[in-house]
Amino acid sequence: MKRLLLVLSIGLIHFFNVMDCPAQKNILIYTHNGEGFVHDNIATSVKALKKLGKKNGYTMTSSDDPAVFTKENIKQFDCIIFSNTNNEAFDTEAQKEVFVDYIHNGGGFVGIHSAAGSERQWPWFWAMLGGKFVRHPKLQPFTIKVVDQDHPATSFLGDKWEWEDECYYLNELNPDIHILLAADLRSVEDDKSDLYVNNAFGHYTPIAWCHTFEGGRQFYTALGHKSAYYKHPVFLKHLLGGIKWVLQEE
């Protein structure tokens, strides 16, 4: 009898532990590039994101194949990360429709660096991501103003962040974006700055933000050009904070 009670007790403890344990989040790391420039940081970024996922209890799947975008397959993911995608991210209109439905059903989206250069002919995608890539000056150190010091992707940075990267210029900015980081253009050396005319933010231009769009949550950072950055603890903390915000864990 005592043995039976012990077995039942252990079973109940296991049952309630399972009940209390939140469901593991599933994340797709998507890296497809259409015809054009392809970053050499993709493999390193995928490795880093999978390592972050493992540390934080996420199931991470990576793919560069647009065929993953089927209605049945994509609904398993809580978040899709476009890690350095560029140019055409999809092969067919049906794949685009699956992605739109995913966002409308509350799916999360994270865009890293050249994700803003994806689907350059698709206005809905620009609005969802929050903006569209225009150009960048040469890779260099520059000063970043931390606009929101309370967001999980930026709360550890202080008022300013000195960083080396490609300073992305973006247009078609969605007015709903909540700006997290802005590059101080006075610290950027660019002899072709006249090709980027945007006085909406004075001496600054947005380079990271979050917002909600048509049912889903989105986070985008323009940072992340070099492979080495995906081993940098501060940059990885920036990415993880954005992912957690999208997953509503922060």
Image (cartoon, rainbow, N blue to C red):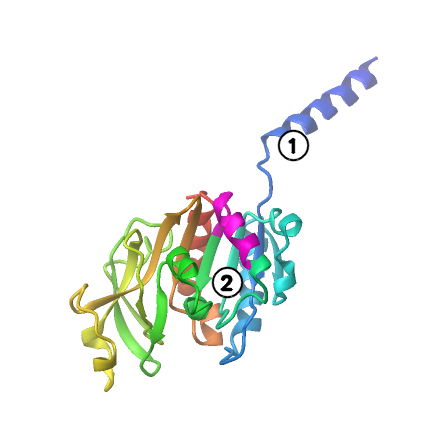
* Residue 32, image x, y percentages: 56, 69
The answer to whether 178 is drawn above or below residue 113 in the figure is above
Mark 2 or mark 1: whose residue is earlier in sequence: 1
Asked if residue 26 is among those painted magenta in the image, a careful observer would answer no
**Percent position of residue 68, x then y:** 64, 59
Q: Position of residue 41 (x, y in %)?
A: 51, 75
Circle 1 packing at 10 Å, graded few (<14), some (14-19), many (20+), is: few
Q: CA distance from mark 2 to mark 1?
A: 32 Å
Amino acid found under the numbered disc labelled 1: Val
Q: Which residue is mark 1?
A: 18
Q: Which portion, as a residue range, is magenta?
A: 96-108
Question: Would residue 152 appear left or right of 96 to someone viewing this image?
Answer: left
Q: Nearer the viewer, mark 2 or mark 1?
A: 2
Measured from the top left, where is residue 133 in percent x and y? 37, 70
Image height of 56 relative to 37, above or below? above
Judged from the image, the secondary structure of the residue bearing numbered disc 1 is helix
- Choose between 94 and 247: the one closer to the eye: 94
| Point 46% across, 68% down: residue | 118
Indicate the quadrant containing the C terminus: top left, top right, bottom left or bottom right.
top left
Q: Which residue is mark 2?
A: 82
| Label disc, if present, on residue 40 of the rendered structure | none
In the figure, residue 18 lies in which quadrant? top right
Q: Which residue: 42% across, 58% down?
A: 124
* Left-right relation of 211 to 183: right
Helix, strand or loop status at disc 2: strand
In which quadrant of the rendered image does the N terminus lie? top right
What residue type is disc 2 on?
A: Phe
